[in-house]
Amino acid sequence: MKNNLKLKRAIIVASICVMGITACSDKNTSAEYITSAEKLTVKNQNKAAILELKNALRLAPDNAEIRALLGSAYLKVGDVLSAESEFKKALTKGLEPKKIIRELSRTYLLLNKEDELKQLLGINDLDEEQQIIVNIYIGIMYIQNSEIKKAESYITQASELSEDSLYSKLGMLWLKSSTSSDEAISAVEELLKVDNTLSEAILLKAHLLRANGDVLDAASIYDDYLNLHPLAHHVKIFKASALVEAEKFAEAEVEIDFLLNLYSNLPILNELKAITRFYDNDFQSAENYARKSMQMDPERSLATLIGGISSFKLNNIEQAYRYLIILDDKLKDGGIGKKLLAITRLKLGYLNDITNEYSADSDISDFDIQMLTAASKAIAQQGNQSEAKKVLQNIDSSKITSIDKLTQLGLLKLSLADSEGLKDLQKAVDLNSENIESKIVLVVSLISKNRLDEAEKLLATWIQDNPSEPNLKVALAEVNIRRQNYALAEFELKEIASEYPKNISSRFRLSQLLQKQNNNVEALALLKQIIAINSKHGGALSGLVTLSTDKDLEIQDYLLSQWRTDKSIELSTALAKSYAAIKEHTKAVDILDSVDNKESSRHYILIGDLYLDAQNIEAAEKAYSMAIVKNSADIQAITKYALSLEMQRKYQKALEVIQRGLNEVKSNIILELLEVNYLLFTNQIQLAENKFNSYNIKDSNQPITYTRLGGQIALAQQKFNVAIIYLEELVKLENMKKNVLMLAMAYAGNLNIEGAIATLNKFLEKGDNIDVRANLAQIYMSTNLALAKEQYLILIKQLPDNFLIHNNLAFAAVNTNDIALAIKHADKAFELAPENPQVIDTLGFIKYMQQDYSQALKYYKQANALAPNDRGIIMHMANCLIKMDRTEEAKVLLATINK
């Protein structure tokens, strides 16, 4: 036993010596370690070189050169954060930054640190090549951030210094690649013949190949980059994505699994994993990974789509609907998710909601996925329907003979506002007159376009040919609903429901129609029938919640009886919301707490929502904070937590919550917008502007938020001309009171009083608004007192007990010689606010205008006692004294103002 222990100890000691962790080697000086590291670097054994340099640092911890060498070694293996750390220490120890200018530039590029990278240009005595390198890396950074004009400026500067420089050529190739990849690949290859280790050239070649569709070749080139920089995990993500595009799912999954072990919460990785699982027909895992990706980044439309399709494949129609309705909201203008969403709506009976969606056959092909992905990306990333339409330009529908594919293509065109899609749908019907699904697709599409006569004509024929198909009859009832023939539609739907006891569509649509007619008893009976068929039917459960305020219907008792036999999340949520509807929030929370769902952030979000409804903001805050504990990357939890803090005016804490969220998810437009918003709330105006300009907010499909924040920042900085540009656009997008008031403020600040008045008057043309009219009246107080009086006379009818309006009306009246009106409202203002100095000052001013100076002075003195530093009151009192020939007293008063 002793011998075994000795042997084990010897092995451990020997291992430590070999690893270079201790001084157990034949090297005695830091110089020897450096020499060894340099030899290892030449052999591309950078990890071993790092160990040697760490040993060198152990002997010479203050040596800046060694720190720089260690940083370079880290950079070569792709450990950029460690590289930056060592470079900073080297500079602190006295190393001149110009000695590591290339390494610093590349580090800041990889970390996307714009300010630090640009500051390198300010280093003294940079030679020509060093200036070129910095300019090129800045340019590449801007290209990667899609800021091409900025990139062009820096790359052009580098080329002007020397267009023959290797880095200048590299920069020009990156610049050309941003607009076209033609001939760029061969040009990059020529560059790599000069230096085959030029990392950014290798990466560019891979990107170009991928853009050209040569995704397998791209994956191979990404590998070349990784051979040089094995820890460059961002490039490993590029490689995995390329392999997925090439449908090499097994190879991709190896890379994805490796990365997920390191970055389990990264949305793109979970999305890629969902795709690989989906193509392996592992729909449950695909849905799980898609859900995780979505929770961390709701902007990931592809993950949402995969989650929806996977749920559909698992026959979980309600869950598929929940996924796809999120996608529908995100892609308002593109509507790619509308196609699959319509399938679930059809099966769940939400026919009235298909007006802007389009149904399709449930057998989703590879073609569909590819098309949906391409178009979805075009819309989500660019917010441009014309770009999405380009996806369809290379498809000749006349050559398609598959009903499924024609239907898919027609729906896709319609979702992109291309009316040619109807022709494709008609052709799909013509190919097989027995295909009911394609017929429903066509008529629902016609109904959505309000082409009711055409839809009715087709339905009449098809129903005659297919008298036992209930959903065709439901579609005909929908035509009558659109025509507001409610009685006929009700009769038709009742007949369908009676003839087909298991048909959900007719029952759900009829229940909605009856609710509109306040026939809640019959509506409830229909909803109960739907629940008997499908206890998790979201529309029916939502309808029950809506009816919950009618206590005579005893909705809570019914849901409770259902819940006792099926404590599903769907029923639990509906029962909780039903209790909340009648303000029994404690019961609602108890129901949710009894469900085995406490490891889900969604559980605490629902509880937070209940507390919010109960006006218990502190409890809501606590619940939302627990949701973040369960999933720190849940965007909904982060935003609701922050908003609960905002409601309590805890703006700094709300800002910190958002910033922690951004650290978790790295990039999310919703959180970025909220960060800018809370920076404004906390009066960090300059930082708000910096973030506003650095984030890609303008192109985020959030034009209202973008223009609002831009206007608010400019207003806070008193850049009124800039604010006007933003706020004029905002009012066009969203003509709401708060936006109109901000625009009027910007005009007034820019001394464009006519613009402010016109803005407020235009808003009042569409309907009265007290706040807008009050602001208009206030502007008139300084420009046209007669018009101010008119506005206050309107306001006083709406706010008869507002002393400020009475007081301002009195002031406007006395200045327009309407003394009787002035006295009436000044007295009323005094009755409402007898201790207000401005009200008393107005009483004094009326007496002054009546030349009753003695009484006026009494009022002024009384007002002055309440507000001794009010310059206006002092001026009025001085003027009154002058009128009373008490000039010396007036001078004394005026002297106090001029101090």
Image (cartoon, grey):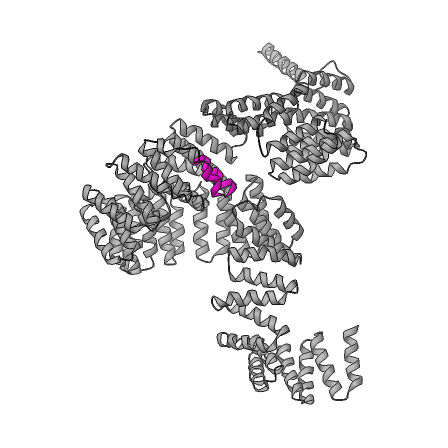
- State left or right for residue 52 relative to residue 255: right
Q: Say which residue appears at 65% left-offset and 80% top-offset.
A: 841
Instruction: Give the x, y percent position of residue 185.
Output: 59, 25
Instruction: Give the x, y percent position of residue 706.
Output: 56, 50
Foreground: 613 or 80?
80
**Residue 144 seen in render:** yes
- State left or right for residue 144 relative to residue 85: left
* Count of numbered circles in the view: 0
Q: Say which residue appears at 69% left-offset and 34% top-offset.
A: 155
Residue span colored magenta: 372-392
In magenta segment, residue 27: no
Q: Residue furthest top?
A: 3
Residue 100's image quarter? Answer: top right
- State left or right for residue 96 relative to residue 222: right
Instruction: Give the x, y percent position of residue 647.
Output: 53, 56
For residue 568, above or below residue 857: above
Foreground: 322 or 343?
343
Q: Which secondary structure type mostly characterizes the magenta part of the structure?
A: helix
Q: Say which residue appears at 53% left-offset and 52% top-offset.
A: 704
For residue 546, above or below residue 265: below
Residue 170's image quarter? Answer: top right
Q: Which residue lies furthest to the front in this view?
A: 398
For residue 842, above or below residue 39: below
Quadrant of image for the C terminus: bottom right
**Residue 88 seen in render:** no
Instruction: Give the x, y percent position of residue 270.
Output: 48, 33
Quadrant of image for the N terminus: top right
